[in-house]
Image (spheres, helix red, strand yellow):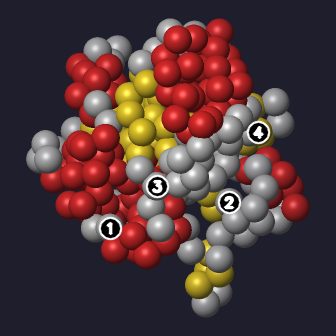
Amino acid sequence: MKRAFFVTGTDTGVGKTLAAVSLAAYFKHKMGLNVGVMKPFETGLPVDRTELFPCDAKSLKDMSGTSDDLAVINPCSFRLPLSPEAAASVERKIIDLAVVERTYEKIVESHDITIVEGAGGVLVPIKEDFFFSDLIKRWALPALVVSRLGLGTINHTLLTCRFLQSQGIKVIGVILNDTDGSGDTAAKTNPDVLRKYLTVPVLGVLPYLTEKERESLDAGRLADMLAAHVKVGIIYDEAVLQSP
């Protein structure tokens, strides 16, 4: 049984990592699970001394409590904030999908549940003619979609979910993230509009967090926040109990 799922988003900067690390913290601290995490491809990395520092992967590692090395969690990292395909081309690196896949299999085999986080949206290219949607399908993972709460999310969310479903990929549901805290009419009405047109559940809305609040969130607080705002039980049931 593959006890794993893929966290994707409608765009970059919508809160995939916030959702992924919150889920990792919840499964670890609320359910007592041995949580595996993976960020197969991370781009736009700052340089720590002479090496790239995978920020998202480090957050996943910290919140999950895994002992896996960062190089395992994030086997492919790039300095430029581009798609993996474009970054690899400019930085003259080769993406070996077989190596990434072997790493993924090892993580899944050694943990109770594994959260895999993408980069950007589902049609971001990893290699020539190979997109994140292809990776999700290749690994036969259900997808959890993260989308921003505000204006524009209806189109982006419906497109993402319908495309994934057209590819035979199971969509667990949608988590909306309040990225700006505007509280405008779009933010107030979007969840109900999406519930009307989606064939998967809107699982909840992550609250707006200031930069200071983000910095102060530890694993326990993240787990509590997720439990208060998101139907985590559905994610667990769909991603784990009904996995092939």
Real-space CA distance between mark 2 and mark 3, rounded to the nearest whole angstrom: 25 Å
Q: Which mark is residue 208?
A: 3
Amino acid type at image mark 3: Tyr
Sequence-wise, the earlier of marks 1 and 3 is: 3
Q: Which mark is residue 74?
A: none
Whether the residues at callouts 4 and 3 have beta carbons within 8 Å, the answer is: no
Residue 32 coordinates in the image, percent (x, y): 12, 47
Q: Residue at x 20, y 61 (%)?
A: 220
SS for tag 3?
loop
Q: Residue at x 81, y 30 (%)?
A: 129
Whether the residues at callouts 2 and 1 have beta carbons within 8 Å, the answer is: no
Residue 102 coordinates in the image, percent (x, y): 48, 41
Sequence-wise, the earlier of marks 4 and 2 is: 2
Residue that numbered label 1 is attached to:
217
Please say whether residue 183 is visible from this viewpoint.
yes
Q: Which mark is residue 125?
A: 4
Q: Nearer the viewer, mark 2 or mark 1?
A: 1
Q: Nearer the viewer, mark 1 or mark 3?
A: 3
Q: Which mark is residue 43?
A: 2
